[in-house]
């Protein structure tokens, strides 16, 4: 812990108080793909008339969702991004994305 980090918390009168490491709080439990249910759908709103495929419901760290997003983009041969816990894939390819996720062991629901 850096000395500057120690300055970022308020003084406690509790004699047993120990500051917690933020890294411990930010780690999320890794849930295996077979226990996750992802929702795959199409969205057209606020995209200039273009369609995108959205994957919602992923539970895991930011690095894990980024890695899954990269895998989906490569396997589909399209661009996309990860924002606010959602994977956004360019194009209307929800069936292809759903089949790739099922191959990877995820439970998939298709919406819309």
Image: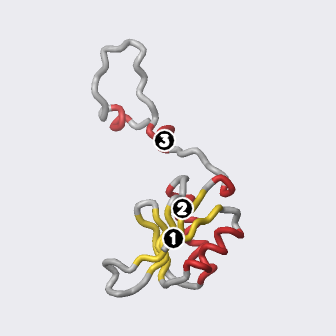
- Nearest to viewer (mark 3 / mark 2): 2
Q: Which residue is mark 2?
A: 65
Mark 3: give few (<14), some (14-19) or many (20+) Cα within 10 Å: few
Q: Would you identify the image quadrant in which residue 34 lies?
A: bottom right
Residue annotated with mark 3: 23
Provide residue 15's location: percent of width, then percent of height.
38, 12
Which residue is located at x 56 percent, y 72 percent? 70
Q: Residue at x 49, y 84 (%)?
A: 91
Separation of residues labelled 3 and 2 (CA atoms)? 18 Å
**Pointer 1: what residue?**
111
- Which residue does the image show at 46% across and 68% down from the upper left? 82
User: Closer to the N terminus: mark 3 or mark 2?
Assistant: 3
Q: Find numbered disc 2 in the image and state the secondary structure of the residue it sits on.
A: helix
Looking at the image, residue 7 lies above or below residue 11:
below
- Mark 3 and mark 1: Cα distance apart in space: 35 Å
Tag 1, which secondary structure? loop
The residue carrying pointer 2 sits among few (fewer than 14), some (14 to 19) or many (20 or more) residues within 10 Å by Cα, namely: some
Is residue 65 depicted above or below 80 in this figure?
A: above
9 relative position to 63: left or right: left
């Amino acid at each position: 812990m850096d000395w500057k980090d120690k300055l970022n918390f308020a003084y406690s009168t509790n004699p047993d108080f120990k500051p917690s490491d933020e890294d411990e709080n930010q780690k999320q439990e890794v849930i295996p793909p077979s226990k996750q249910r992802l929702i795959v759908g199409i969205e057209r709103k606020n995209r200039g008339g273009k369609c995108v495929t959205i994957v919602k419901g992923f539970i895991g760290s930011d690095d894990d969702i980024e890695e899954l997003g990269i895998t989906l983009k490569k396997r589909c041969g399209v661009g996309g991004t990860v924002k606010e816990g959602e994977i956004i894939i360019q194009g209307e390819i929800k069936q292809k994305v759903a089949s790739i996720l099922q191959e990877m062991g995820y439970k998939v629901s298709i919406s819309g």
